[in-house]
Image: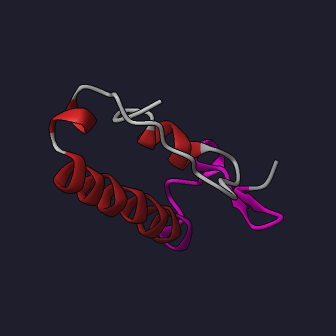
Amino acid sequence: MAWVEDDRLYPKEINENDPFQTAVLKVFVERYEVAISWIKAKFGDRAERGELRILDMACGSGYGSEMLSSIGN
């Protein structure tokens, strides 16, 4: 499988020695980190306890959904 296919990013397929691939992954991961920070700021304790229900539409390969699952279900 390619590291990116059909507009989906597959982090486990990234070649860590390829600066372009690692830069692309970094940008995609940072987007979810920003979203998580915003959700935590907006919903506080509920996010910390994992009580939120989060819908990640058009989630591609799902790596971002996995990141979001740390603060919701």
67 vs 15, left or right, is left
Residue 62 vs 69, above or below: the answer is below
Task: Name the residue at 43% across, 42% down.
Answer: 68
Percent x, y for residue 14?
60, 53
Q: Which residues are magenta?
A: 3-21
Residue 51 vs 65, above or below: the answer is above
Residue 9, image quadrant: bottom right
71 vs 60, left or right, is left
60 vs 69, left or right, is right
Of residues 63 and 54, the one drawn nearer to the viewer in this rendering? 54
Q: Residue 19 magenta-drawn?
A: yes
Percent x, y for residue 19?
48, 70
Q: Residue 20 magenta-drawn?
A: yes
22 vs 14, left or right, is left
Residue 67, image quadrant: top left
Residue 44 vs 38, above or below: the answer is above
Of residues 60 and 57, the one drawn nearer to the viewer in this rendering? 57
